[in-house]
Image (cartoon, rainbow, N blue to C red):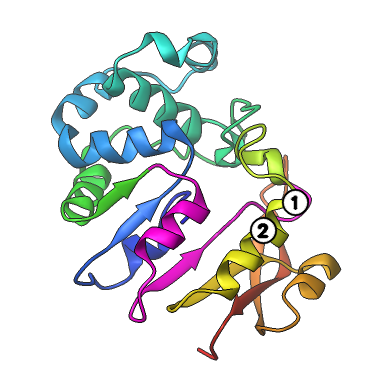
């Protein structure tokens, strides 16, 4: 849920039934196109350059006027050629000491792996509360990766608001299955989820405009002890 780049799905062993969900239509369209139309998606990218002018052209396009495949190509290019894989307010990512994160020579290899992994995965595009209520079972495990507290609009205006953290907590309070929420370590989150297991983990953030990384603490909040 709140699939984002779905790193956990791609790194974990395949389960009997798997569902990824995100309310962002462009992200869901990208996953579905890779799942069902990989060759055509790669064809669109075959002769594209990593260039500021190309980035600006994609950014200026209205996604609602594009086919699903064109929309997915646009979204993928802006994510990979932009700074920080931002969904909104993208800026062209360029630096004198590192190559582009969009490696045009390895697109087919990388996306073929994603295509195979997604081949038997259900892809949903619904509100988190509706998905939890629909698929909750005693054997269900929910991995939930919402926007960071204080950065609610990073994935689109109005998709997830500050009030949704309390709403999400209340929805999770009544489930039969297990859950883990990964979130930034702030006082408000610790207070909201004080009745649950909270584990600190260390990770690194890339610093804007530099190759440096900053170590930070994040939280894994769950209704069980991993």
Say which element carries label 1: loop
Q: Are marks 1 and 2 in contact (CB under 8 Å)?
A: yes
Most distant residue in the right direction: 187
Q: Is residue 2 visible?
A: no
Query: Residue 214 appears at what percent x and percent y?
Result: 73, 62
Of the pair 36 and 223, the residue shown nearer to us: 223
Residue 170 lies left or right of residue 139; in this view the side is right
Number of other residues with Cα within 10 Å of mark 2, as a class: few under 14, some 14 to 19, many 20 or more: few
Q: Is residue 196 above or below residue 214?
A: below
Residue 163 bears which disc, if any?
1
Query: Residue 174 appears at what percent x and percent y?
Result: 55, 74
Q: Residue at x 82, y 74 (%)?
A: 191
- The span picked out in magenta is 125-151
In space, the residues marked 1 and 2 are separated at their CA atoms by 7 Å
Q: Is residue 188 above or below residue 58?
A: below
Residue 37 bears which disc, if any?
none
174 in magenta: no
User: Which quadrant holds residue 131?
Assistant: bottom left
Residue 91 lies left or right of residue 103; in this view the side is right
Query: Residue 93 appears at what percent x and percent y?
Result: 59, 31
Residue 183 lies left or right of residue 66; in this view the side is right
Task: From the image, tell me which residue sits under label 2.
Answer: 167
Of the pair 33 and 206, the residue shown nearer to us: 33
Most distant residue in the bottom direction: 225
Of the pair 146 and 57, the residue shown nearer to us: 146
Query: Residue 115 appears at what percent x and percent y?
Result: 20, 47
Say which element carries label 2: helix
Q: Is residue 72 visible?
A: yes
Q: Residue at x 66, y 34 (%)?
A: 158
Q: Residue at x 64, y 51 (%)?
A: 147
């Amino acid at each position: 849920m709140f699939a984002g780049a779905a790193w956990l799905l791609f790194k974990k062993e395949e389960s009997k039934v798997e569902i990824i969900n995100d309310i962002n239509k462009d992200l869901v369209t990208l996953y579905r196109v890779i799942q069902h139309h990989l060759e055509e998606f790669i064809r669109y990218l075959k002769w594209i350059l990593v260039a500021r002018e190309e980035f600006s052209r994609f950014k200026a396009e209205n996604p609602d006027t594009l086919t699903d495949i064109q929309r997915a190509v646009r979204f993928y290019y802006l994510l990979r050629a932009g700074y920080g894989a931002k969904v909104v307010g993208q800026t062209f990512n360029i630096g004198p000491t590192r190559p582009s994160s969009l490696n045009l020579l390895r697109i087919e290899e990388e996306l073929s792996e994603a295509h195979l992994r997604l081949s038997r995965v259900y892809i949903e595009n619904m509100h988190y509360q509706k998905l939890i209520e629909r698929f909750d079972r005693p054997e269900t495990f929910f991995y939930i990766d919402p926007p960071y507290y204080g950065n609610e609009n990073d994935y689109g205006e109005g998709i997830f608001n500050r009030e949704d953290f309390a709403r999400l907590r209340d929805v999770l309070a009544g489930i039969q299955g297990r859950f883990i929420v990964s979130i930034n370590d702030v006082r408000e989150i610790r207070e909201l989820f004080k009745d649950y297991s909270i584990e600190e983990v260390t990770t690194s953030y890339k610093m804007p405009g530099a190759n440096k990384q900053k170590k930070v603490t994040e939280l894994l909040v769950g209704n069980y002890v991993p």
